[in-house]
Image: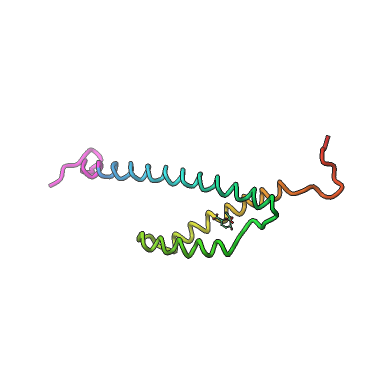
Amino acid sequence: MTTSNSAGTDPAVHAELERLRDSIDNIDAAVVHMLAERFKCTQQVGHLKAAHRLPPADPERETRQITRLRRLAESAKLDPAFAEKLLNFIIAEVIRHHERIADTSADPAPGAPTNPS
Ligand SMILES: C=C(O[C@@H]1C=C(C(=O)O)C=C[C@H]1O)C(=O)O
């Protein structure tokens, strides 16, 4: 028979839950830091594209990334459909950023004053 705490849960179960949640918190922190680094790179890509009048989205590049990520997911025993959805979600946000960068760095209309003052 197992002992229980006041909430009726075996203390060993509670300790195991805490241990696993500590790891989950560390992994979540790593994911946030990795995403922040990724967005730093994609922001630079956005500025480069805007400066050279390149389109915000590159569907061919995306197709190659999805194919690669699905393969990586399979070998890591992660659902490839989930990996694809996650990448598409991130890329959609990046493209929104690129569109905003392109809009805000667009040349003024011909003849428009360069200095509003
Ligand atoms: C970052 C880029 O811009 C877009 C965003 C991508 C991404 O987040 O990986 C990939 C392709 C583009 O649609 C790029 O062209 O490399």
Q: How many marks?
A: 0
Residue in the image at 50% along x and 57% along y: 87
In this picture the colour scheme is rainbow
Relative horizontal placement of residue 61, taking residue 110 as reference (left or right): left
Looking at the rendered image, the quarter that the C terminus falls into is top right
- Residue 42 x/y as whole percent: 57, 49
On whether residue 8 falls in the magenta region, the answer is yes
Specify the farthest residue to the top. Answer: 117
Magenta-colored stretch includes residue 46 = no
Q: Horizontally, is 5 left or right of 111 in the view?
A: left
Q: Residue at x 29, y 41 (%)?
A: 18
Q: Residue at x 44, y 60 (%)?
A: 82
Question: Position of 12 compared to 93: left or right?
Answer: left
The residue positioned farthest toward the right in the image shown:
111
Q: Quadrant of residue 9?
A: top left
Q: Position of residue 55 (x, y in %)?
A: 66, 58
| The quarter of the picture showing ligand 1 | bottom right
Between 19 and 36, the residue placed more toward the observer is 36
Q: Looking at the magenta stretch, what is its main secondary structure?
A: loop
Q: Position of residue 56 (x, y in %)?
A: 64, 56
Q: Position of residue 6 (x, y in %)?
A: 23, 38
Is 16 in front, or is 108? 108
Q: Which residues are the magenta region?
A: 1-15
Front residue of 86 and 113:
113
